[in-house]
């Protein structure tokens, strides 16, 4: 399964595997993204090193993660999605983020680049 073959599956599985599993974060990242993957999140460029640096603290703070996908589209090597990421923190807080993501796929179906705009929304 890659983002190119199952974008909804990727959106729901990747946060779980990256943020909650015992698997090596680099192996999880490489399963779904190319080696030169870049994510621009709210104008901030995150390369492989910065993404891995982000995953490790999430594993310490998050007790649960789930994704509610509203829209997920694949057209050739382009993807777009609108979804909510709901994080239940170890201290009991729930953080809900709405995400608008646009990306480019590599020929093997993994993500090569993604641009996201996010906004916090009231948790329900």
Image (cartoon, rainbow, N blue to C red):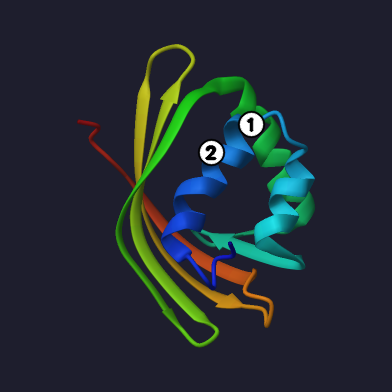
Q: Which residue lies at the image location 56% right of the left edge and 68% below the top edge?
A: 114
Which SS class for mark 1?
A: loop
Cβ atoms at labels 2 and 1 below 8 Å apart: yes
Q: Position of residue 6 (x, y in %)?
A: 48, 65
Which SS class for mark 2?
A: helix
Quadrant for the N terminus, please.
bottom right
Q: Residues within 10 Å of mark 1 (few under 14, many from 20)?
A: few
Label 1 belongs to which residue?
21
Mark number, residue 16: 2
Q: Which residue lies at the image location 59% right of the left edge and 30% below the top edge?
A: 20
Vertically, is 107 above or below 89?
Answer: below
Q: Residue furthest top?
A: 91
Distance, label 2 to label 1, CA atoms, is 7 Å
Relative placement, left or right, of 24 versus 89 is: right
| Front-lying residue, 114 or 30 | 30
| Front-lying residue, 58 or 77 | 77
Q: Earlier in the sequence, mark 2 or mark 1?
A: 2
Q: Residue furthest left?
A: 124
Q: Position of residue 105 (x, y in %)?
A: 60, 77
Relative placement, left or right, of 25 versus 96 is: right
Dividing the picture into quadrants, the one containing residue 113 is bottom right
């Amino acid at each position: 399964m890659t983002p190119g073959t199952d974008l909804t599956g990727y959106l729901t599985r990747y946060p779980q595997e990256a943020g909650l599993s015992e698997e090596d974060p680099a192996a999880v990242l490489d399963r779904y993204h190319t080696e030169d993957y870049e994510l621009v999140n709210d104008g901030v460029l995150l390369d492989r090193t910065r993404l891995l640096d982000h995953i490790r603290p999430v594993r310490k703070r998050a007790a649960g993660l789930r994704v509610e996908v509203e829209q997920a589209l694949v057209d050739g090597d382009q993807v777009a999605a609108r979804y909510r990421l709901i994080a239940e923190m170890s201290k009991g807080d729930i953080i809900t983020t709405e995400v608008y993501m646009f990306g480019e796929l590599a020929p093997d179906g993994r993500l090569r680049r993604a641009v996201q705009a996010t906004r916090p929304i009231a948790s329900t």
